[in-house]
Amino acid sequence: MSASAATPAPNDFTFYDPFDGMRFGPQQCFLCGTPTMPRADSVPVFAEWLMTRYNLHERQIKLLDLSIVQFNDLRIPCCPQCRTKHVEPLEQEVEEAAQQGVESLRALGDKTLFLWLGKMMYGVLVTEILNELEPLAVPQYPLAENAQMLRRFQAFFQAFQALRVPVEFDDFSPASVFVLEVSQTQDDMPFEYDDDLSTLTFSIKLDNAVLTACLVDNGIIRQAMRRVYQDALRPLHPVQVAEFKARVYYASYILNVVPDYYPRALAPGATHIVMDTLIDDITGDIFNPWDNAAYGQSLLEMWKRWHIPLEEIMREPDQPLSFLYDADGAPRLLARYPEEGGTEQNLAAS
Ligand SMILES: [Zn+2]
């Protein structure tokens, strides 16, 4: 440690709960609740480096009430302390890893990726919730009126406090994070982003890396998809990545539990708070039953760019169309889509 460095502020071990009084407006820091100067004290939801690198400043996002905002206008209130001590170092860490590519992003680890994706998810979600107070059109699924969604959001925010409070998760990851690699052959989208706010599922593409996460499942979906993820750790065609995302989004949709988090009492002299978790699965199953017809809708949505009709996706109702696996369940190699000459390959044969 440098002797000339200013004495660091002592760690703040108090958890902030914006749900107490529903304090999501521009007057208080999103991480700690300190009063802020609206607009002046804020950070962009999509970091400056992201907007610069992918030319996003003017790009538009359509909100649930159909109003349009620019990436540049998506900001969350943040006090100078949280900005310089927590948000900017996190962004810098991810920026450096992103420059080096997929492996470096994977090496960041679950907690860092959870916090980074979580910050964007939080920003988009709060923008939607605030927007619902003055909507242009009545949203189809009002978030603030959805009790389970609010419970999820609240649970997420507790674990997300790890961005500010020094927290160690006791032997679990609050999220399922997947980092996929896209093969270059037919990849023409340097940046892509989508989310499902009701399940806190989020996906972002940075050149040939696609990060997809359910942010409030305690890693259950990654556990359930461990074989599929293992098989997907190779350069994938974009249509295969889209299928993988459809699986994650659909699994988040049928996930039936919301974790509870419990910070342990702080031991004297401790530098970290240990956080425990509990999932109440006594009252029901962890997942609602998998329904292929509903999963087919998820595929239809993710494959929109390729115009794959539902009839083709559901030709075999018990086994919706897959580009990740062949009919025998072996991982498929897909160089191009549509495939030329209809020749199919699988990894075992190649
Ligand atoms: Zn703050």
Image (cartoon, rainbow, N blue to C red):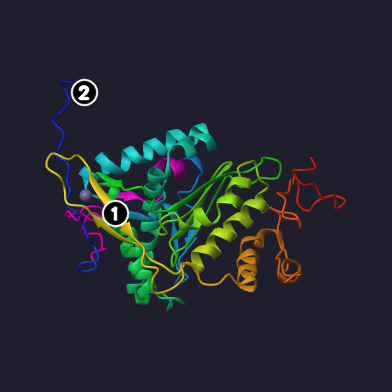
Q: Residue 297: x and y, percent?
A: 62, 70
Q: Residue furthest top?
A: 3
Residue 165 visible from this viewpoint: no
Question: Residue 179 lies in magenta, yes or no?
Answer: no
Query: Based on the displayed image, in which of its 4 quarters is residue 49 positioned?
Result: top left
Q: Is residue 328 left or right of residue 29?
A: right
Mark found first going from the N terminus, 1 or 2: 2
Pick the residue in front: 277 or 92. 277
Q: In this view of the protein, which residue sits in the foreground, 269 or 212?
A: 269
- Queried on whether the Cβ of the residue with tag 2 lies below 8 angstroms from ligand 1, the answer reads no
Q: Is residue 330 left or right of residue 138?
A: right
Residue situated furthest front in the rendering = 282
Between residue 105 and residue 318, name the one nearer to us.
318
| Label 2 residue SS | loop
Drawn side of residue 263 relative to residue 147, left or right: left
Q: Is residue 318 left or right of residue 150?
A: right
Tell me the magenta residue range.
23-52
Which residue is labeled 1 in the image? 276
Residue 104 percent across, percent down from the top left:
49, 34
Q: Is residue 83 above or below residue 263?
A: above
Q: Residue at x 32, y 37 (%)?
A: 89
Q: Amino acid at mark 2?
A: Met
Disc 1 and disc 2 in contact, CB within 8 angstroms: no
Instruction: Tell me if I can see residue 90 in this picture.
Output: yes
Label 2: which residue? 1
Tell me which secondary structure the magenta stretch mostly adopts.
Answer: loop
Give the quadrant of the C terminus: top right
* Crowd tier of the residue under label 1, counting other residues whose Cα lies within 10 Å: few below 14, some 14–19, many 20 or above: some
